[in-house]
Amino acid sequence: MTSAEESSSEQENNFAPINSITTVPAKSIRNLLLYSISKKYISNKFIRDYLDVDHDKVAEILAEFQQAGYIGDETGNYRYPVNLAFYDLIELVRDSREN
């Protein structure tokens, strides 16, 4: 195994499967993560607007995303850095379809 493959394998182990997120439908999870990867962060406001939910529901969603390893701790302005790369999302989606 090359060092790039080893690094990729280690990263995969850090992320919980998409079906471990229970607060958001799977399609919405994929869309939120895709948007987040493109921006390199996700915000409280974006989730509220995208899903039309209140602050309490967003807090639940963000907590699950953090627990799954998808995002890091808040960095200010209610923004959370994304720990996933596009490749990681593809792997998570593929794994969710296989299971």
Image (cartoon, grey):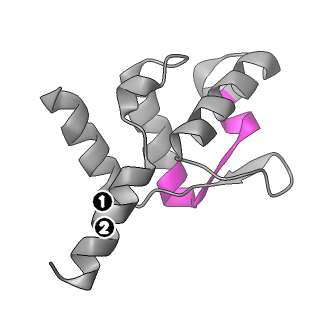
The residue that mark 1 highlights is: 87
Element under label 2? helix
Q: Along the line of sight, which residue is nearer the eye, 97 or 77?
A: 97
Whichever of callouts 1 and 2 sits on the residue coming sooner in the sequence is 2
The residue that mark 2 highlights is: 8
Residue 80 in view of the camera: yes
Question: Tag 1: residue type?
Answer: Tyr
Where residue 21 appears, x then y in whole percent?
Answer: 48, 25
C-alpha span from label 1 to label 2: 9 Å
Give the residues in magenta: 36-47
Residue 50 vertical position relative to residue 67 in the rendered view, above or below: above
Please report the residue visible at 66 percent of the width from the left and 34 percent of the height from the top: 62
Question: Tag 2: residue type?
Answer: Ser
**Quarter containing the N terminus:** bottom left
Tell me, yes or no, whether the two marked residues, 1 and 2, touch with CB atoms within 8 Å.
yes
Q: Quadrant of residue 28?
A: top left
Disc nearest the viewer among 1 and 2? 2
Left or right of 77, for residue 33? left
Instruction: Report the predominant secondary structure element of the magenta stretch.
Output: helix
Where residue 4 appears, x then y in whole percent?
Answer: 27, 79
Element under label 1? helix
Q: How many marks?
A: 2
Left or right of 24, for residue 8? left
Q: Along the line of sight, which residue is nearer the eye, 61 or 9?
A: 9
Left or right of 75, for residue 21? left
Where residue 78 appears, x then y in whole percent?
Answer: 81, 45
Where residue 45 appears, x then y in whole percent?
Answer: 75, 35
Please report the residue visible at 49 percent of the width from the left and 17 percent of the height from the top: 22
**Quarter containing the C terminus:** top left
Residue lying furthest right in this view? 76
Residue 43 inside the magenta-drawn segment = yes
